[in-house]
Image (cartoon, coloured by chain):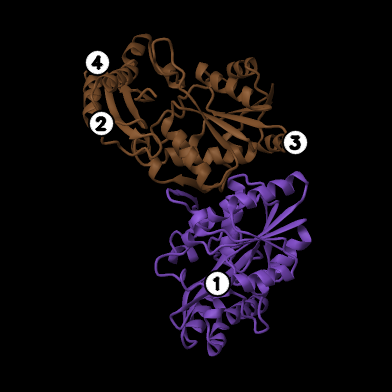
Chain colours: A brown, B purple
Amino acid sequence: MKLVQHPGEMADLSALWRQEGRKIALVPTMGSFHDGHLALMGQARQLGDRVVVSLFVNPIQFGPGEDLAAYPRDLQKDRGLAASVGVDVLYAPSAQEMYPPGFQTTIRVAALAKGLCGASRPGHFDGVCTVVMKLFQQIMPHLAIFGEKDFQQLAVIRRMTRDLDLAVSIIAHPTVREESGLAMSSRNGYLQEGEKEQALCLYRAICFARELVKTSPFPLAAADVCGQIAENINTTPGCVVEYVEIVDADSLESCETINNNSRLILAVTVNRKVRLIDNAGLVEL
Amino acid sequence: MKLVQHPGEMADLSALWRQEGRKIALVPTMGSFHDGHLALMGQARQLGDRVVVSLFVNPIQFGPGEDLAAYPRDLQKDRGLAASVGVDVLYAPSAQEMYPPGFQTTIRVAALAKGLCGASRPGHFDGVCTVVMKLFQQIMPHLAIFGEKDFQQLAVIRRMTRDLDLAVSIIAHPTVREESGLAMSSRNGYLQEGEKEQALCLYRAICFARELVKTSPFPLAAADVCGQIAENINTTPGCVVEYVEIVDADSLESCETINNNSRLILAVTVNRKVRLIDNAGLVEL
């Protein structure tokens, strides 16, 4: 596996692969790989002739007071993990080369980025869109794989890709969970052992909602379900709901009643320091 | 010459050309071709193996109360003119296909788009950047040619291209002028015969500034030159200055004193209805 650190070198390599007719699959990441990342890389290996994993802790998607400095970084460990699943190139550019002096361009997806995480993290999705566009232009992938764990991000990237006519297929990979049900996340590393139990309140909320949907007569009012979930979470010691919503999976607009395309999506803070998100479809199809 | 009206058809054609190793040159336009457009097309013909001219009156770069509805359109005439200079494809998509329902993505270049025309046309350059990005993704050109007449637009597009790592060379074509010195513009068609004489106040301002620079001892204060130009224009019957500035040609920031990289840039309204712009370097190198 090759480690590439300069945008120009990456672009040259991709141009060569394109000339040779290779299909390029990209997995964009911020590193600190867990089994979720490795599952995405495995899918990329199946779908592409050449697999590029980008590793870049993107400063412009972090707000002031967020965890940019604390975000876990371990290039050597990540390098070994990526190599172990057959990645061809680990692309880890520097912030200086990604955002040189004078940089001033932003991409914004309006409605989809407004609520949910966008409400408490202003500018976050602008930063995500901008870096993903840069990565797409540098790496020129035929397809890119994003985890459903960041469901709003996936919807925003899909929209940007469609709106700006990017010739990249956006592939969603289902959320990978620990045996307990906790969604894998690099930010789980912030949790002490006892806190992992508290963090399960997100997965329990999903199970609760799914069970309710399975056993209740339709139509089922989304606001009632969200209200019960919020109460359950807020009565879990140390857990505070940031948002709990049931939305249409495409528009991310609130549902009045639950239907086949409804998605539960929630953000919770554990012990005032670790912010976790999760989401799931509610109707088994 | 082929007329292409659907984005998918254009993208397929460009992908084929790319496979064949052809160099694609793009001239983005809003139609209503004059000798300025034809000069850009001629340059594209020299630089590219395949020449695409896009013709799209882009609604999102017009503000409320601007001349979107009145903007001159004559596809049949433009078709003949483009064919006469050896264009391969005239690409004229519909607004419905460019901006289908749900479209919500915008590209913004911050500092460069703020002053000058950006001050009186909020959102204008966002619209320009967004459509140029879409055209680049649909047409996949190796190079794109923009007229220096729209100098701020050129600077903004260069910046976007660099910031987002687009693999497109941006080529500037010098402003083409009528024999009188009036910069060619589709909006000159709004001028009655007598008004063309009034509109010459822009070119006279350029000549005045150049002469002053040639004959005055350095350093020459930019504000003094702009002040004199504004007075000359505002005393021309029917002419009102929107802005007159001398800026650095790269950053578009105001110069205190005139240097080799200074550019005079101005916008004037003639008889309260026709808004004209022009610009020029001030030091003969």
Q: Is residue B219 above or below residue A70?
A: below
Q: Earlier in the sequence, mark 3 or mark 2?
A: 3
- Quarter of the figure with residue A198: top left
Residue at mark 2: A222
Labels 1 and 3 share a subunit: no
Labels 3 and 2 share a subunit: yes
Q: Is residue B12 above or below residue B5?
A: above
Kindly indicate whether the residue at mark 3 contacts the one at mark 1 (C-beta within 8 angstroms).
no
Residue at mark 1: B73
Residue at 59% of width from left, 52% of height from top?
A: B7
Residue at mark 3: A16
As shown in the figure, which amino acid type bears the numbered disc 4? Pro
Residue at 28% of width from left, 20% of height from top?
A: A239
Q: Which residue occupies the foreground of this view, B32 or B155?
A: B32
Q: In the image, residue A116 lies at what x, y percent?
A: 34, 35
> What is the chain letter for disc 3?
A
Kindly indicate whether the residue at mark 3 contacts the one at mark 4 (C-beta within 8 angstroms).
no
Q: Earlier in the sequence, mark 2 or mark 4?
A: 2
Q: CA distance from mark 2 to mark 1?
A: 50 Å
Q: Secondary structure at mark 3?
A: helix
Discs 2/4, front: 2
As shown in the figure, which amino acid type bears the numbered disc 2? Ala
Q: Is residue B85 above or below residue B237?
A: above
Q: In the image, residue B134 lies at what x, y percent?
A: 56, 51
Q: Is residue B221 left or right of residue B19?
A: left
Q: In the image, residue A66 lies at what x, y percent?
A: 40, 31
